[in-house]
Image (cartoon, helix red, strand yellow):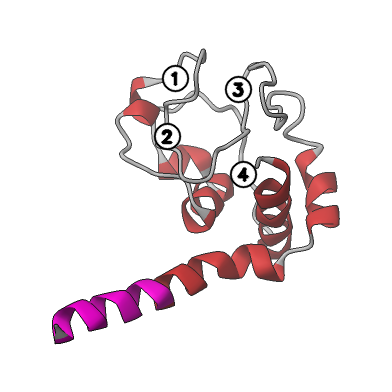
Amino acid sequence: MKVRIAAVAMFGVLSSASMAAAQTGDAAKGERVFGQCKTCHTVDKGGKNGVGPNLAGVFGRKAGTADGFKFSEAMTGSGIVWDDKALAEYLKDPKGRIPGNKMIFVGIKRQDQLDDLIAYLQKASR
């Protein structure tokens, strides 16, 4: 019983930590940051894939599983499930985080821009 209570408490702490980026980010500023992503990605539910996959419903989705998009073996084999932390790590250095993936983007180095982008994606990709 004590182990289960401790596990539930730890889950709450980790969930709160993973939401920190979205809570500290500014979605309006993140929409401007997303401007550099729009060339390849859409966020509209039912939207089309472009050069990159549609990002609607990305949170909680296993990497490499968006319908109708042909992913690299590196992405499908990554084992990642997208959440705030995983997206931020990937978007900071896509080739470093998942070597061999097809995304042609050098990454977002500024933490404030990453936080803003994650906040925007949390809102826009629902």
Marker disc for residue 71? 1
Range covered by the magenta-colored residues: 2-12
User: Counting residues from the N terminus, which is met first, the one under dot 1 or under dot 2?
Assistant: 2
Question: Type of residue at label 1?
Answer: Phe
* Quarter of the figure with the N terminus: bottom left
Q: Majority secondary structure of the magenta segment?
A: helix
Spot occupied by residue 74 in the image (x, y as percentages of width and height): 35, 28
Is residue 71 placed above or below 59 in the rendered structure? above
User: Counting residues from the N terminus, which is met first, the one under dot 3 or under dot 4?
Assistant: 3
Report the residue that reaches farthest toward the bottom. Answer: 2
**Which type of secondary structure does the marked residue at label 3 adopt?**
loop
Spot occupied by residue 32 in the image (x, y as percentages of width and height): 85, 46
**Residue topped by disc 2:** 63
**Residue topped by disc 3:** 52
Alpha-carbon distance for marks 3 and 1? 9 Å
**Residue topped by disc 4:** 107
Question: Type of residue at label 4?
Answer: Gly
